[in-house]
Structures are given as C-alpha cells and as structure tokens.
Image: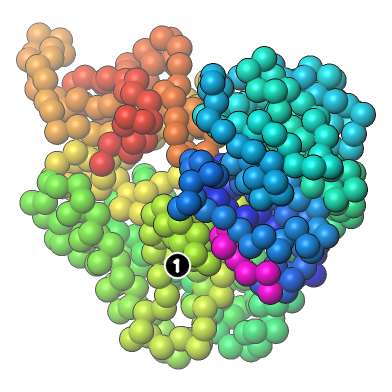
Amino acid sequence: MQNQIALVLDFGGQYKELICRTVRECNVLSIIKPSDITIEEIKQINPICIIFTGGPNSVYLEDSPKCDRRVFDLNIPLLGICYGAQLIAQLLGGKVEKCDTSEYGETECFVDTDNDLFKGLDKEQQVLMSHTDRITILPSGFKLLAHTKDCPIAAYGNEEKKVYGVQFHPEVEITLNGKEIIRNFLYNISKASGDYSMDDYINSQVESIRKTVGNKRVLLGFSGGVDSSVCAALLAKAIPGQLYCLYIDHGFMRKDETAHLKKTFENRSINFIPVDASSRFLEKIEGVSDPETKRKLIGAEFAKVFEDEALKLGNIEYLAQGTIYPDVVESGKNKSAVIKSHHNVGGLPSSLRFEGVIEPLSGLFKDEVRKVGEILGLPDEVVHRQPFPGPGLAIRIIGEVTREKIDILQRADVIVREEIKKSGEKADQYFAVLTNSRSVGVVGDFRTYGYTLAVRAVVTSDFMTCEYAKLSYDLLSRISQRITNEVKEVGRVVYDITSKPPATIEWE
C-alpha cells in the first residue's frame, strides 16, 4: 500500500499497539518498529511523522533504550509520549530527574491552546499520568505547553522544528480528548492527508493476492474464528474457486459449530473441507488432567491432522494464514519485545513444501479485521464473535475430558451465551466452565450428586486485562435455573468474580 505512514518507535511501552491503533482510527497508516531502527531504515519507510512510545525505564540510565540521535536531522515531525517525551528532551539538551511526587492515574492538566497540538481543546483536560521521572529543564528553543499540579512540564513543543512531547498518555480512554491531540499532531503538524481506509486496504490486498497467486491454489487452515473467517472471505473475493479451507473439528467446539460454519460459507467461492477428527483428539488426551499438557497434545495433534489432510488434497502451492498485526508485534518479529509466541508466525510446515505464505490480514488490528469482515458482508455473529481458545472446550473442562463432559458443557454453554446476549447487559466475553467438582443436591424427593458449573463473564477493551462483568441478579438467576433444569447433570451453578490479573480469562 502506498499510504502515508506514521512510524511508531517502541521503547518498551505497554501501550504501543494502542498508539498505533489510535493513529489508524484517524485514517493514517501506522506501523511499529523497535527503537534501535537505523536511520537508513527510517528513510526507506519515509514516514510523515514519528511517535516515540512510553517505556518503563529512566532515560538517564546507561542501559535504557535510546534511538539514533540523527533522527532529529531528518526534519520529520516528532511526538514523544511519556518516556518518549523525556528522551527527546534529554537528547536535545534538556534535563530529566526523578519526581518529588510521582503521578499515577486520572489527572487534571492545564494546556496552552494557542498552539497546533492542543488547538480546539479546552484549557483544562483530564489525562492519564503514569511516571516517576519528570522533565525539569526544557531544551533550548522549546516552549512549555501544559502543566499539572505536580508536573510543571506536562507538555512542550518547538513549532519550527515540529517536535513535541507530552508526559501523559493521549492514546488511552482516560485521557478524554487524547485522540483529538493525536489527530492534531497528524493533521495540524504532520500535514496528513488521511489516505488510509479499510476499503483501500481491501482493494490493495485483492490486487496483491491476485498478482502473487495467479491461477494457483491456496490452502487456509480455517478455525471459524474472526481472523480466519475474514481471511477466507478476502481470499474468496480475490481468487474465487482457488481457495481450499481446511476446517478440523477436534470435537471440542461449541454446540453445532461445524454446521453453523458450513452454512455461513456455503455460498462463497471457496472449497470448504470439514474434517471430523474428534475421536483422534479425544484418544490423544484420554486420562490427561494437566491443562498445559492438554494444550500441547492438542496443538501437536492438530499439526499432524492438518498435514495428513493437506497431503490428501494434492499439490497446493500456497498456504494462507489469518495472522494479524498484534501476532507479529507480540511474537518479536522485527525485533519487537517478545510477549508471547503465536503459531501463525512460526513459519511453514517444512514437509508440505508450499511455495509461499499469504497473510492478507497481517497489517491489521482486530477492530480493523472486523471492519473488513463487515465490508465483505460476513454476518454479525461471525464478525463480532467472541474469542475462543484453540484447544476449545477441552480447557474449559477442568480435569480429564470425556465425551459426556463435552456434551454437558456444550448444552450449558449455549444457555449462558443465549441469556447474556438476550439480556443486553454489558459483557465482552462470556462462557461456561465445567469444574471437576460435584456437590449434593435435591430434585423432588431424590438426592442428586451433580457437577458444579461456573459462569465466566468479563468486561475488557483489549483482553489483556479485564474486570468481571457486574451481571444483574435476575440474569444470573435465569441462567442458573435454566442450566439446572435443562442440563440434568449439573447440580450447582457459581459465578466467577475474579479479575485479570490475578486470574486469566480462561480457567486453564
């Protein structure tokens, strides 16, 4: 894509992806690169501006991350955020010291609106502060643009050099007008044209796929999740009839999942190949209770089944994957810090010997992927479906997995999802967990000894952290009554009120 680019340099900040996403929401393409990128690489990218992220270090320490000092000679507009603002100040001759009083959380900030960065905003702004160091002396030629009660230099700038810094985080929701500040930097200072949109992205990818693939065939490992579904729809648009979607049902899917996916994609120009491998997977994890062992066995078996089925299809030249941009960033590609490894970024199965890999979503964030899905006409229940773990219900069943337990959980999980969705109450992800605990109950005049089932519902913006959803007692009561009435094997229903951290969203 020949779009204007805003380059985000990563200094270890936890919000780097949020900065990148916010820029894209302003219709400017942004990409993340490590802070030690070379000047030659920056010139090759040819960005219209550069944003320095925050970071956990102190800029005055020798081993703290830095960037090439010559970045200031490129005459490219710069915006430093938190650590990034401190680094710019120090590199240009200012001074950064430890705070007398650290600032954390929501803070009132007073800004100078007679400049392009804060143009159109009120003089008093709510921002998120999170710092133990502060700028005490500005570099020569720079002007103070904002302050708080405990931070005399909360923002600064040099209009001539087009270099700015903010001590707070404009990329987060707590900073109420943060997106407008970033928009001002992009449009007022960097003179962005706003040439980035999902329609343009789709057209560019369709052209690229057709040029790469020609009349050859493509195999997509299809899970039915948001990423693989959107990837399939985009490939079907680009190369109708040449795409083979291999869907492996390991037996741990939600109730009627396979039938639903068949119906969703039956009228698209793809070759949908469902494979029922449930017996093979269940045999592989028979008697296994440890969650990590379950995950590893299921993952290894999945690769074997995929390879077996792919070989049956004969000569297919390309492999497609639903890799998205956070997968690439979090897996440490391009020298970003490794947060977690993603199987999509690991490379091709050597034994299958594909000519190449196609990842048409690898430049997109999840919300952008959903937008592409909407444009391509995928149904809402596919585009906005909730995350579902690769091992499926096998890690929502505590302890050993059996066919009986899978059936129980499938039936209970449907009730949880139906009732919460119907209620309209706020929850971003919700599901049922079948525990390994039984408890005594009574139905009529008879003693029962049924399973304890847990309901999990969370509120989150990024799925990296979450709070438990404050569902109403009426809703929880309906869920409990339906499950104990309709799923006879369950004798007790409990609600998980643990946030992440310390818990994870999934139980295993």
Find residue 279 and report its image quarter: bottom left
Name the residue nearer the viewer: 451 or 302.
Answer: 302
Describe residue 504's horizontal placement relative to residue 161 as left or right.
left
Q: Would you say residue 470 is visible in this rendering?
A: yes
Mark 1 sits on what residue? 345
Measured as percent of width and height from the top left, residue 55 is found at 53, 43
> In the rendered view, would you say 211 is above or below 148?
below
Measured as percent of width and height from the top left, residue 98 is found at 53, 30
- Magenta residues, start to end: 33-40
Q: In which quarter of the image is the C terminus?
A: top left
Measured as percent of width and height from the top left, residue 403 is found at 18, 48
Name the residue nearer the viewer: 381 or 230.
Answer: 230
Q: Is residue 34 magenta?
A: yes
Q: Does the magenta stretch include residue 88?
A: no
Q: Quadrant of the N terminus?
A: bottom right
Describe residue 439's horizontal placement relative to residue 206 as left or right.
left
> In the rendered view, would you say 219 is above or below 433?
below
Residue occupying the point 23% across, 34% down = 434
Q: Is mark 1 on a helix, strand or loop?
A: helix
> In the rendered view, would you say 487 is above or below 444?
below
The image's colouring method is rainbow
Find residue 507 and report its image quarter: top left
